[in-house]
């Protein structure tokens, strides 16, 4: 059955950046985990890197509209998220995989993704097809009717990715998506990311520099809740010198940028 | 006015339309869409290689459909899976009510336990459907367009449809007026939702249960008689409170259907 393309899908976007944060502040408990962060993200796959406790997960949660920003401005898909805005329209265009992916153990993968699609207010008629497509894209088609409690860690992660991409989101937020994936699945996953990144804004939070080097076109590096560096993966590689710590060119670039930032802050 | 294109023109169209101008080709194409006879002429006009290919593709698809797996049966139980998650809490509430009925049936001298417990019986499962601790997928639910009060009210209705029959059985066994167990139960549920929009539903439910137990259940068990709020004379009061609290919840749901940042409700 051919899908009808709606007017909304072909309309030109009315915003310059899918994600636009200005002096964004977000609290994690009492601690200001994201502090005056300026960030602009467009189409493509962006890798979010940073040391432990840099505020990666808090930033992801704020972008996913789980946490309300404590200050600054955050615009997603042209819609203001700060203040008392109606988030419904923005949320329809979001896909989110939390770091701790909670699921209902008795649900089958298909039921869970269907339930999420329903919560995302997708039209009833397109849900079965969209669910099947999402499950196939993450390579879980043969386990689609198994209960989620019977899945392995890597499979659960892939089920989590399936629920995030079921609505073809314009902004896809994945918090540590490669944890628990074996090397082969990792390759498939990178391929999937590149495919989705062709026409949507994908932000992948990870601590694995190698994932970023291969799968991401751009890198966002944050530390202590602030933006340290943003550029293409190639530019990050060029930053590293022979004296920097790391096994690959990208890792050397990462440690070089971070070291330079720490030098600036302490100076 | 339809004049059929000549067989020569159709065969020129089939072979790639060299030397025929675009306007004629469009006219032929538009005509072919509506005229079966000319489509038959077109079928004969295409070269044997193409016809063979089309036949093979059609055969392949037909065999695939015939031998492949059948379409997945749509599960009607999709949304009831959520109810299954709350099942332990529903069972607890049910068990409590039935125990109260049995107790009351055995010991006639004490004040009616059924009437004393009925108001807070739905609160336990209502808190369970909207609690961060008990809902593993709370973080996902909090990012969905279909969240907030409408979803909470939907889940609450589900809980009530399971709890009220149990209350009805307990009330019928012990021979109490339906108003005396139904209205307080509905009033407390509406109260938990109304208070829940401010402090979180699970906290509101807990607070109301504790207040009711300490303020009414305890004293009346000590006195050995039913409090005046649970006698026939207070029915109008209960009705009024139920209607007022339901109105508060409905107005809130209608004015702010998608309360930004559901952390308030969903913690």
Image (cartoon, grey):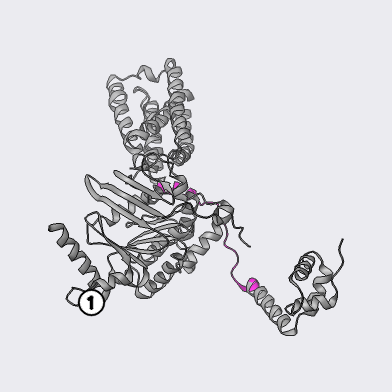
Q: Residue furthest left?
A: A267
What x and y, as percent, mark residue B83?
A: 45, 46
Residue A223 visible somewhere in the drawing: yes
Q: Which residues are magenta?
A: B65-85
Label 1 secondary element: loop
**Picture residue at 31% right of the left edge, 23% below the top:** B216
Residue in front for this viewpoint, A81 or A210: A81
Mark 1 lies on residue: A247
Q: Residue at x 31, y 20 (%)?
A: B224
B82 magenta-colored: yes
Mark 1 belongs to which subunit?
A
Categorize mark 1 by other alpha carbons within 10 Å: few (<14), some (14-19), many (20+). few
> Nearest the camera: A103 or A29?
A29
x, y percent for residue A87: 43, 44
- Which percent across, then down, holds residue A43? 43, 61
Q: Does B30 appear above or below B107?
A: below
- Horizontal arrangement in the rendering, residue B161 relative to residue A6 (left or right): left
């Amino acid at each position: 059955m051919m899908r009808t393309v709606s007017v909304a899908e072909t309309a030109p976007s009315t915003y310059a950046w899918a994600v636009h944060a200005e002096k964004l502040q977000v609290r994690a408990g009492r601690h200001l985990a994201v502090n005056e962060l300026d960030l602009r993200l467009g189409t493509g796959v962006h890798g979010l890197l940073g040391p432990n406790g840099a505020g990666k997960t808090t930033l992801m949660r704020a972008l996913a509209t789980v946490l309300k920003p404590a200050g600054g401005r955050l615009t997603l898909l042209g819609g203001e998220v700060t203040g008392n805005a109606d988030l419904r329209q923005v949320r329809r265009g979001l896909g989110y995989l939390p770091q701790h992916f909670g699921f209902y153990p008795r649900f089958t993968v298909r039921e869970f993704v269907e339930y999420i699609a329903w919560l995302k207010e997708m039209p009833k008629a397109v849900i079965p097809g969209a669910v099947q497509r999402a499950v196939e894209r993450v390579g879980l088609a043969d386990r689609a009717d198994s209960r989620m409690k019977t899945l392995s860690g890597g499979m659960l992660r892939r089920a989590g990715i399936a629920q995030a991409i079921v609505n073809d989101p314009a902004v896809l937020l994945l918090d540590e998506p490669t944890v628990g994936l074996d090397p082969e699945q990792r390759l498939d996953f990178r391929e999937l990311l590149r495919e989705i990144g062709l026409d949507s804004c994908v932000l992948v939070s990870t601590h694995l520099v190698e994932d970023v080097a291969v799968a991401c076109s751009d890198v966002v590096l944050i530390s202590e809740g602030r933006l340290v560096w943003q550029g293409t993966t190639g530019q990050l590689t060029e930053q590293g010198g022979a004296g920097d710590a790391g096994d690959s060119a990208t890792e050397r670039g990462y440690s070089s940028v971070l070291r330079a930032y720490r030098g600036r802050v302490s100076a | 006015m339809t004049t059929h294109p000549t067989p020569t023109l159709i065969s020129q169209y089939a072979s790639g339309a060299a030397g025929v101008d675009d306007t004629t080709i469009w006219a032929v194409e538009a005509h072919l869409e509506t005229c079966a006879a000319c489509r038959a002429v077109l079928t004969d006009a295409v070269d044997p290689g193409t016809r063979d290919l089309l036949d093979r593709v059609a055969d392949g698809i037909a065999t695939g459909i015939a031998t492949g797996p059948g379409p997945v049966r749509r599960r009607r139980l999709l949304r009831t899976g959520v109810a299954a998650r709350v099942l332990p809490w529903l069972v607890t509430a049910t068990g409590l009510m039935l125990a109260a009925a049995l107790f009351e049936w055995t010991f006639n001298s004490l004040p009616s336990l059924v009437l004393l417990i009925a108001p807070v019986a739905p609160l336990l499962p209502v808190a369970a459907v909207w609690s961060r601790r008990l809902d593993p997928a709370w973080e996902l639910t909090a990012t969905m367009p279909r969240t907030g009060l409408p979803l909470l009210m939907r889940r609450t209705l589900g809980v009530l449809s399971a709890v009220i029959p149990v209350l009805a059985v307990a009330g019928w066994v012990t021979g109490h007026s339906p108003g005396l167990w139904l209205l307080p139960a509905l009033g407390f549920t509406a109260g938990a939702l109304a208070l829940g929009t401010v402090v979180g539903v699970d906290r509101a439910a807990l607070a109301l249960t504790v207040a009711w137990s300490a303020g009414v259940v305890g004293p009346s068990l000590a006195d050995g008689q039913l409090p005046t709020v649970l006698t026939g004379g207070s029915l109008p009061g209960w009705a009024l409170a139920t209607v007022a609290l339901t109105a508060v919840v409905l107005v809130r749901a209608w004015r702010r259907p998608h309360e930004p940042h559901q952390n308030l409700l969903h913690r």
